[in-house]
Amino acid sequence: MNNAFCITSKSLDTFLFVILILGFIATHSLLSYSLIFIAYFALTLRILLIKNKLFVEKSYLFLFILFLLNIIIQVLFNISLRSIIYSLLIIIGFILYSSIASFNLKHNSITKFALFLLFILLLHPSILDSSLQYKSFLLNANSLASVYLLLFFIIELFGTKPQKLLNYFIFLPIYLISIESRSLLLAIILYLFFKNLNFFKLRNLSFNIVIIFLIILMLFFVYPNNLFISKIMYSLDLSNIKIFGSDLFYGAGREELWKIVIETNPSPIYGIGFGNSNDYINNFIHKDLSPHNTFLKLYLEGGLLFLSTYILLVFFLFRNAKTNITKSFILAIQIRMFFESAFPFGVSLSSALIILPYFIEKAYLLKYSIKNYEKNYISHTC
């Protein structure tokens, strides 16, 4: 115990963290999953070679058991190679994500890395075409939105005041204009709203208010043609509001995908099997598309059982996060999950956005735990 905080160097942990972030970003590029698997292998070696480096909470273990039960259900009712792969990703993800909490990071280096990466993305020769629409080595504009959200969080957590101001007044406007992502704009606005309102001092009350707010927002977006909601939008003249040239409440074709999931799910209790949502939707529209909604994707693939487990996971992350920055980001990112498909503990960047911030915060707070440890236990040796 005396040298528990001294086993790994900051340089090594910082390097592994950078590789991990780059790996997640690469999943949205032509590199696909090659770099993230290298990062996962490095994290596995770190766990095997360094003792006492797993972050475990009782409630986290309870969630792990719930996810295992969902995996067992999938094996019993929807056994397939794809379902097995997704199940393994959940198990591996639970272990590897928790190891991030023990990273002893160089805070300033992490922030400089995030700012440098934002700058490099803007320097890419094909980042903008004639219409100012994003175009780069990432697969699409939504990929860049996910990249920016992750780097935004890192800068908010680790950055100094000048670094945060640089992000807000230089990078944020440029990215919002070039990406033209309504969900990115909405996530950033809600993050700032939650963070600056000190919304989480009244924990139970505030959480209920936030949940009600998100449900109302989802209803406006998912059911814009509902008679009651249409009357409200008409009376407030909200139906013609445009952001980045698109109607605020227009889902860019997502409504059709969502309708398929909601109205035709053949197994609402336990789903059709992990990873099978694209094939299922393809049967209706003959296109290889995901539901473009994480909640509906999980409902279709794992049923109400898996969706409920995911909601409990989000509640755990929110409830146990220590900083207002992380709490706000966890809630704001769920807005983006209404518009993009992700899978908890998956290897894509979109999936990482769900859980990764919580464990990054644990690594951020570790620095202060170490200082307190060194202050109170001077006799320890490294």
Image (tube, rainbow, N blue to C red):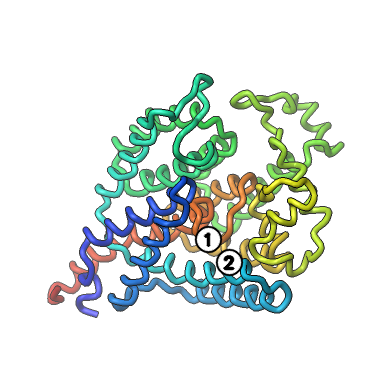
Farthest-out residue, right: 227
Instruction: Tell me the element at label 1.
Output: loop
Q: Quadrant of the C terminus?
A: bottom left
Q: Residue at x 74, y 51 (%)?
A: 282
Camera-side residue of 82 and 168:
82
For label 2, the crowd category at 10 Å Cα-Cα, with few meaning under 14, some 14 to 19 and many 20 or more, is many
Q: Which residue is mark 1?
A: 346
Residue closer to the observer: 52 or 43: 43
Q: Dot 2: what SS?
A: helix
The quadrant of the image that shows the N terminus is bottom left
Q: Which mark is residue 153?
A: none
Q: CA distance from mark 2 to mark 1?
A: 8 Å
Asked if the residue at tag 1 contacts the one at tag 2, i.e. Cβ–Cβ closer than 8 Å, the answer is: yes
Question: Where is residue 53 drawn, in percent x and y?
Answer: 33, 73
Q: Residue furthest top?
A: 130
In x, y percent, where is residue 212? Answer: 68, 49
Q: Earlier in the sequence, mark 2 or mark 1?
A: 2
Q: Which amino acid type is marked by label 1?
A: Gly
- Residue at (21%, 64%) from the top-left corner? 9
Q: Please provide percent x and percent y for residue 178.
A: 49, 28
Dot 2 corresponds to which residue?
86
